[in-house]
Amino acid sequence: LLFFPDYQTVLTLDRTLSVTGQFNLLQLGFQGAKAVGTSSDGLLWVYDETSFLLKKITADGTVIAQSGDLSLAIGQPLHPVFLVEREQTVFMADPNVGVLVFDAFGQYHKIIPISGIAEFQVMDDQLVYFREGQLWSFHLTALLERPFSLTFELGQAAKLQVANGILYVLENGDLTAHRI
């Protein structure tokens, strides 16, 4: 998924990075989409800041699921920067509020109070994220947060991805892999 917020355009790609779909969110009636993610059934989750709603839409813009007004539920406007669905749960990060958790129908459940993060991964029962130069893990059922013990330093601008026990680090154009 590639999201171009300045143009309100979303491209979906296959595993060979070929374009499989294009969504013009302005043409679909969205004026302020700030966070976008794919759903497990190939549709699109969109958070629309102008309506304060998380919506699941089809390619033609039909809304098939949506949250209630999140500004009322949370008590403040949201400014999410990241959204992902894993195992019928939607996670949306607002660096000032934390990680909001929704079910597969877009219904709000709770906030995980981890502020200051803009990206994360959901792996099994873990939320893995990078904050303040440190790789962290938050267990979603035990509700415990702990840092990873790494034998190397991570820069503030590092981009991270964890897969199969390996931490991939992209920093200053260099990609390195570390077993964790």
Image (cartoon, rainbow, N blue to C red):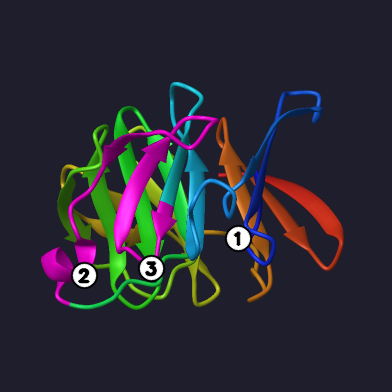
The residue under the point 18% across, 43% down is 107
Q: Are marks 3 and 1 in contact (CB under 8 Å)?
A: no
Which one is closest to the eye, mark 1 or mark 2? 2
- Residue 172 lies in the magenta-colored region: no
- How far apart are the two marked residues, 1 and 2, measured between alpha carbons? 42 Å
Amino acid at the residue labelled 1: Thr
Amino acid at the residue labelled 3: Thr
Earlier residue among tags 2 and 3? 3
- How far apart are the two marked residues, 3 and 1, measured between alpha carbons? 44 Å
Please state the horizontal and vertical placement of residue 7, each as a whole percent of the image: 69, 61
Residue bearing the label numbered 3 = 50
Disc 1 crowd, CA 10 A, few/some/many (<14, 14-19, 20+): few
On screen, residue 154 versus residue 93, left or right, reads right
Q: Quadrant of residue 113?
A: bottom left
| Label 2: element kind | helix
On screen, residue 57 versus residue 114, left or right, reads right
| Label 1: element kind | loop
Single out the residue that lies furthest toward the right: 173
Disc 3 crowd, CA 10 A, few/some/many (<14, 14-19, 20+): few
The residue under the point 58% across, 55% down is 26
Please state the horizontal and vertical placement of residue 79, each as a whole percent of the image: 40, 72
The numbered mark at residue 71 is 2
Residue bearing the label numbered 1 = 151
Is residue 124 in view?
yes
Q: Which residues are magenta?
A: 47-75
